[in-house]
Amino acid sequence: MIQTMQRAMTRDRQTSSCVWATLGLSLILAWAGQGQAAVGPRILPEGQLPQDSRLGPLKDLDGYFPFKPAPDRASWERRAERVRRQMQVALGLWPMPTRTPLKPVIHGKLDMGDYTVEKVYFESLPGLFVTGNLYRPKNRSGPMPGVLCPHGHWPNGRFTDAGVEAVRREIVQGAERFEDGGRSPLQARCVQLARMGCVVFHWDMLGYADSVQIPYELAHRFSKQRPEMNKTENWGLFSPQAEAHLQSVMGLQTWNSIRALDFLLSLPEVDSSRIAVTGASGGGTQTFILCAIDPRPTLAFPAVMVSTAMQGGCTCENACLLRIGTGNVEFAALFAPKPLGLTAADDWTREMPTKGFPELKEHYAMMGAPDAVMLKALLHFGHNYNYVSRAVMYSWVNKHFRLGLPEPIVEENYRRLTARELTVWDEQHPKPAGGPEFERKLLRWLTEDAAKQLATALQSHQTFRQVVGGAVEVLIGRSWAEAGQVEVSPHDSVDRDDYREITGWVRNTTYNEELPAVVLWPRQRNRRLVLWLSGEGKAGLFQAAAQGGYEPRPEIRRLLEAGTAVASVDLLYQGEFLADGKPLQQTRRVKNPRESAAYTFGYNHPLFAQRVHDILSVVQLIRSADRQPERLSVVGVDGAGPWVAAARAIAGDAIDQAVIDTQGFRFGKILDLWDPSFLPGGAKYFDLPGMIALGAPGRVFLAGEGAEGPEVARKVYALAGAPENLVVYRGDPSQTRQAAVNWLLQ
């Protein structure tokens, strides 16, 4: 970094000084974040911002989400592992919750002639009940195909009834054949599949029909934060604490889908080699999400949902971290090479024939199954799962499950059941308790269960790296292998008394990011480099000089006198990223008025993660230089400690040693979704100490953590066989910088 910046300097020093004076660049940067003025060099004129893509508009669910097929199977397997892990982490399923006993209850069988309908409920988690109906063919013996039917956002869900007037319009338009079938297209689907010889389970989304414990208005219409639920203990859904532990309605619904599959496969007559999942709209989302992360389904048919456009508007279809750098088409591609059927309509899927499906076809061909993916574009219909669409699905199931039924399969009429006939609750089977206290209790159980699961990661250093490291890589959103191509562009060089001050840009060309940077290069130098980061940005290297202007802080001066070069940068929304010079108080959010973090952080990296990306860019630049330093130390003080801990967790031994002053920071204490330090999932994986532990066995000087340091870090350093490399500072906090420099100079 240093050599590159210096070599690119072609102007002579006297001319450079004149240019600085002519441009009138301010050398003093006001910084209110630390309660005092901070000084240092600027690159840009006051008010002008870096050319960084992250300063542009945020992405939201209505953005464009293209899918780029991998060139070969090996490349795809690497990408698939990464995307699947991202989904599991985002949905709170990394590691998977404990599979507690389902305790299924099946009752109230209705004989419908050639099929039966039964009422079912079971516990997906202790006290959380999944409710639905089981459709079984009569006069058939197993093994029979099993089909899961999530319903989507039809009014009243499983109990939906469009009414006579609406269905007659559908019949006239050719969308339906019969009044009963059109009044409940959800029941019609289940009935026909049962008549085809399939065992079908049709269950409720949270808040619909019999699923009453988490209400509809919360699960699907949440709009305003609830102060009474935003606590560090006993929190509720959508709160900062829930997001910090990756607890969401979408995660709960996905877990219910997994447990619904567990239930279906527990039936002795169901053939585990022929398991289909099909739903439309929100049920389509449930379909491709389940089929992407669970290997057991063998056929998928998500109707009118997979597209490169709108990704799902409901709070039940969004989770923090879920679609950053990916989208629904890629989620569907994870099912390859198993049979995947799709429909498109005159909705957000209308462009699928030209945007999304051609790439899926290419992908399936690469996977050796070009005929296992199909799209039926029925663009003359609006958003639907009508008879015409269902007929396409029946044929797909018939073909790939080898049912041997003559084509075309024509859906016949049936007797539509009323909500009273379908409900699972009665005097012998009373509704379970729900409401706010149940919600708190459920999330508390999930938190405690996750802690128990994660405790097993402390069995070995390798397991900890795999489980916790695999999760943190998703939280930060950029692995070391994905750090990008980074180059440096010099701006100016100024000779000081015994060092040279070089300013310039660190540019990550892969991601179109650029950082204002400064390097202080002593005349008598060794081959060591310290990257010094603080809450003030690069101004953290300097203080006001008595004679005017600025000079290095005493601790920086000590490093320079010892021959060690010191570099720093303005991370995103520090220093020259701030037009008014004032520190950022809250992060940006998308324009969606609903106060769910997932609408912003389901599509955009949190600011905390972006600042870690910046550190990785600088480290990558240093490590790709022709002459690398013999020792690279990264220092995080005055608020930068958590970023350095996370960067060290990702970069591993690319950073030789680190100074991390945490100042006692914990993600789990943040009670504002828009706090600049908010990180979805940050509290779940041992909080900040988990990130510190991922630095093992590398050398670290750790301050702000008390006399002993965090237990998890001590354990992991011991597992890595390097407990001596974790140095915990026990002295006066006001002397941390000086003590850190002493350690660096050893």
Image: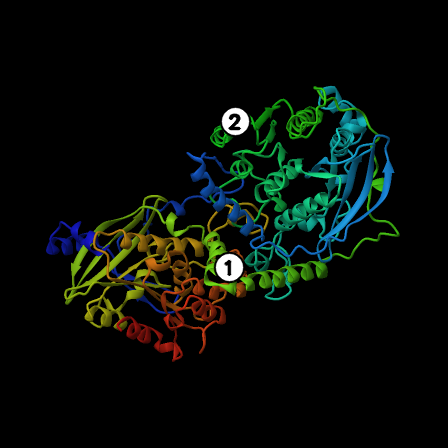
Q: Quadrant of residue 572?
A: bottom left
Q: Position of residue 80 (x, y in %)?
A: 49, 42
Q: Which residue is mark 2?
A: 370
Q: Quadrant of residue 408?
A: top right
Q: Position of residue 51 (x, y in %)?
A: 33, 46
Residue depicted at x 61% and y 52%: 248
617, 717: nearer the viewer: 717
Q: Which residue is mark 1?
A: 682
Q: Position of residue 479 (x, y in %)?
A: 41, 51
* In the image, residue 443 above or below residue 156: below
580, 272: nearer the viewer: 272
Q: Position of residue 67 (x, y in %)?
A: 47, 35
Which one is earlier in the sequence, the residue at label 2 or at label 1? Answer: 2
324, 712: nearer the viewer: 712
Note whether residue 498 is visible: yes
Residue 439, numbered label = none
